[in-house]
């Protein structure tokens, strides 16, 4: 799959590449299921001890966390990632400025660990949400009330947490409110109470979370308009099942007012496209897509000047139209991408403008984009077998700008 254990480089990967070069033949190395479980990274193995200080009204005063992180027997390039990422998410969705987090990494005789589905988020969410549940019980407060009291407010963003991480935006009450509505939360509480009276083991839980995306360095993108008016996109992010080809074509097409069918995506060959950092850690849409969006905007600005030159109008009077540009207030006076490209490559350009219609961007955002959400669960446990059943689960996740709904689903 396009997640998890793909991040580290294993020795067998290098050997397979070497043999392919030496033999000039395709080489495939396939591990058995047991070999895979024993030698590739596992998601997490941490022991956490935590303390939280609160006022009597439920306001959080401070947080202290000690983590002992088992890294396994070998140190891969990304093994230390999840404990480090947990540090950034330790405060969760809440206003906590006095924080102490100590992370002790240890080697053992087990499989190596690494970024595998969440990479620090599950650990940090479990820690902070469990503390709040315990605090609400001790203080005699409603478990939702204590969360609402400590949420970072929308007007406080960008917000720097006690661990020094900057959250860019958020409205944590909104997904909580939506999840409670979708789950019919009050009815779940009534069902819980009724079934407990009959001796059943049932419970209702909720948790909120934050998670960063778009970190770990730069990404690159080139947008080029060909002589035909079609668009070629070269990206440094490589797709292996994430649907980048569809998403990148949509980004370029939407910005440039053309059809996705007229956009060609090239990736995965560093002899053709420029360098990139990689496809991992929920970063491609933010950083890779961001690079393409900036490159497309620069192409559009240059194209506007060319269009203005062709129709003898001021650049500020040129507006985008389907398939190209038009003069403001005169929609019938239209210039297609094909006409603009023909001028760009034949030299019919404004004075001092470089020939061609292409822009390359290396985008290295200074901070990450932070998503957030709420989960509500209704679970039961069989007294005889101990089997846990999730009877209802509602997830509300802030996805930001949804490029392609089908890919998100």
Image (tube, rainbow, N blue to C red):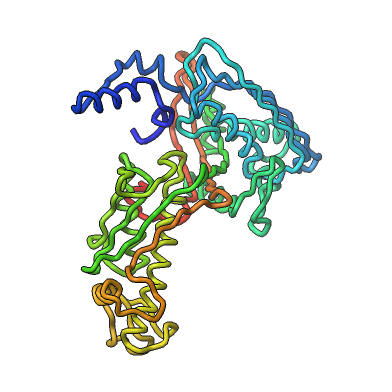
Residue drawn at point x = 67 percent, y = 35 percent: 132
Quadrant containing the N terminus is top left
For this orientation, the residue located farthest to the left is 25
- Comparing 198 with 323, the one in front is 323
For this orientation, the residue located farthest to the top is 109
Residue drawn at point x = 69 percent, y = 45 percent: 161
Whether residue 400 is situated above or below residue 391 in the rendered picture: below
Residue drawn at point x = 28 percent, y = 83 percent: 334
Whether residue 331 is situated above or below residue 294 in the rendered picture: below
- Position of 343 compared to 144: left or right? left
- Comparing 404 with 325, the one in front is 325
- Comparing 82 with 365, the one in front is 365
Would residue 105 be visible to someone looking at this image? yes
x and y percentages locating residue 94 in the rendered image: 67, 44
Whether residue 23 is situated above or below residue 329 in the rendered picture: above
Which quarter of the picture shows residue 295? bottom left
- Position of 346 compared to 43: left or right? left
Residue drawn at point x = 72 percent, y = 42 percent: 162
For this orientation, the residue located farthest to the right is 56
Which quarter of the picture shows residue 345? bottom left
x and y percentages locating residue 97 in the rendered image: 75, 43
Which quarter of the picture shows residue 253? bottom left
x and y percentages locating residue 286 in the rendered image: 46, 51
Would residue 323 be visible to someone looking at this image? no
x and y percentages locating residue 48 in the rendered image: 64, 24
Whether residue 367 is situated above or below residue 200 in the rendered picture: below
């Amino acid at each position: 799959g396009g997640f998890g254990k793909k991040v580290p480089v294993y020795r067998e990967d290098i050997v397979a590449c070497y043999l392919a070069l030496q033999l000039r033949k395709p080489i495939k190395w396939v591990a058995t299921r047991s070999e895979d479980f024993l030698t590739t990274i596992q998601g997490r193995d941490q022991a956490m001890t935590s303390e939280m200080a609160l006022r009597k009204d439920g306001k959080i005063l401070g947080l202290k966390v000690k983590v002992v992180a088992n890294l396994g027997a070998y140190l891969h390039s990304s093994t230390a990632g999840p404990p480090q990422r947990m540090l950034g998410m330790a405060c969760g969705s809440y206003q906590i400025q006095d924080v102490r987090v100590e992370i002790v990494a240890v080697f053992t005789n087990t499989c190596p660990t690494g970024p595998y589905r969440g990479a620090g988020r599950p650990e940090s969410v479990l820690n902070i949400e469990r503390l709040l549940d315990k605090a609400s019980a001790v203080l005699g407060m409603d478990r939702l009330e204590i969360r609402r009291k400590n949420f970072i407010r929308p007007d406080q963003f960008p917000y720097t947490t006690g661990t020094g991480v900057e959250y860019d935006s958020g409205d944590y009450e909104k997904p909580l409110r939506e999840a409670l509505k979708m789950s019919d939360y009050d009815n779940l509480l009534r069902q819980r109470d009724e079934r407990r009276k009959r001796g059943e083991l049932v419970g209702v839980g909720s948790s909120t979370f934050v998670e960063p995306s778009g970190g770990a360095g730069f990404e690159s993108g080139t947008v080029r308009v060909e002589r035909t008016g079609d668009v070629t996109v070269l990206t440094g992010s490589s797709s292996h099942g994430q649907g980048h080809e569809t998403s990148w074509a949509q980004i370029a097409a939407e910005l440039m007012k053309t059809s996705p069918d007229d956009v060609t995506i090239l990736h995965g060959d560093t002899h053709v496209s420029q360098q990139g950092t990689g496809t991992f850690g929920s970063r491609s849409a933010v950083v890779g897509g961001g690079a393409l969006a900036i490159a497309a905007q620069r192409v559009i600005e240059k194209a506007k000047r060319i269009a203005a030159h062709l129709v003898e109008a001021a650049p500020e009077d040129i507006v985008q139209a389907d398939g190209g540009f038009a003069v403001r207030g005169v929609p019938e006076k239209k210039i297609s991408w094909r006409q603009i490209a023909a001028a760009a490559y034949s030299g019919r350009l404004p004075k001092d403008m470089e020939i061609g219609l292409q822009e390359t961007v290396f985008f290295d955002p200074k901070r990450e984009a932070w998503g957030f959400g709420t989960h509500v669960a209704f679970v039961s446990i069989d007294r005889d077998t101990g089997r846990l059943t999730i009877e209802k689960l509602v997830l509300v996740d802030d996805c930001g700008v949804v490029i392609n709904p089908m890919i998100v689903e």
